[in-house]
Image (cartoon, rainbow, N blue to C red):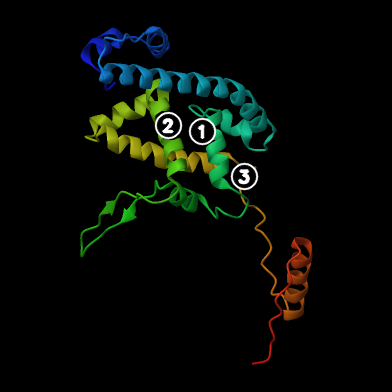
Amino acid sequence: MVAPEHLRATMRGLPLTKQLARIEAVGTVESATIEHRITVLTLQSITTRIRFLTRQLAELDPELFRLLRQHPAGPALLAQPGVGPVVAAQLLLSWSHPGRVRNEAAFASLAGVAPLEASSGQRTRHRLNRGGDRALNRALHTVAITKMRCHPETRAYEIKRTAEGKTHRDIRRCLKRTLARKLYRGNGSCHPHQHPPPRQRLSPLDCHNDCASVATATRIRPVVFSDQI
């Protein structure tokens, strides 16, 4: 919190709910400095915004959970350790549609958890992949952190890799790559068993008819392109 020390001291160590209540109770006096009054007003404005967003979350979370339960892959995702409604929704949004993700490696690349080769000469090296869908990467990061805290098997894996000399960051990256593999293989209903049909090449007449239909619907005169040069 960026505020005078006497204000920060009253908030230090308190949970968020008590901090918000204390900020709402803070008053301003005429003798206070302009910096103090502006700071209090700003904090109270932020508190009002937090209250509003909290109410919105309370209203939207049940609707999100209901939508996930109706999705073919929703129940399987929610059954995964560390996967909540928000993470599951992000996974489905990033997946987008059948046929977008060809295989498990493509899904890992989409999530930005597949290392990129950076070999030189006889030395084989890989570097961190900072591309891909960063929202999907953040969702996998959330699952990895949650499992490292609460999941016994993941905790045992972390202890084992730590004994091998791996850092906490290295272990987390390995977990995210493993999660991408498990989530892809575990969601059979999402797999693109049937790829979308190839696009058919339209004749110039079909293109003209389509343009004319759209133009009629939008009350715009179509532009006709001649095939002859």
Report the amino acid beneath label 1: Val
In the displayed structure image, the side of residue 192 where residue 216 appears, left or right: right
The residue depicted at 53 percent of the width and 53 percent of the height is 103
Q: Can you identify the residue that label 2 sits on?
A: 142
Residue 52 percent location from the top left of the image: 52, 21
Q: Are marks 3 and 1 in contact (CB under 8 Å)?
A: no
Q: Nearer the viewer, residue 219 or 123?
A: 219
Q: Earlier in the sequence, mark 3 or mark 1?
A: 1
Nearest the eye: 61 or 187: 61
Numbered disc 2: secondary structure: helix
Please name the residue that numbered disc 3 is placed on.
Answer: 190
In the rendered view, would you say 7 is above or below 204? Answer: above
* Cα–Cα gap, marks 3 and 1: 16 Å
Q: Secondary structure at mark 3?
A: loop
Point 68% across, 82% down: residue: 225
Mark 2 in CB contact with mark 1 (< 8 angstroms):
yes
Residue type marked 2: Thr
Q: Foreground residue, 221 or 14?
A: 221
Q: Nearer the viewer, mark 3 or mark 1?
A: 1
Identify the mark nearer the N-term, 2 or 3.
Answer: 2
- In the rendered structure, which amino acid carries the disc numbered 3? Cys
Residue in front for this viewpoint, 145 or 15: 15
Disc number placed over residue 87 in the picture, else none: 1
Q: Would you call the spot at circle 2 few (<14 residues within 10 Å), some (14-19), or many (20 or more)?
A: some
SS at circle 1: helix
Q: Position of residue 175 (x, y in %)?
A: 38, 36
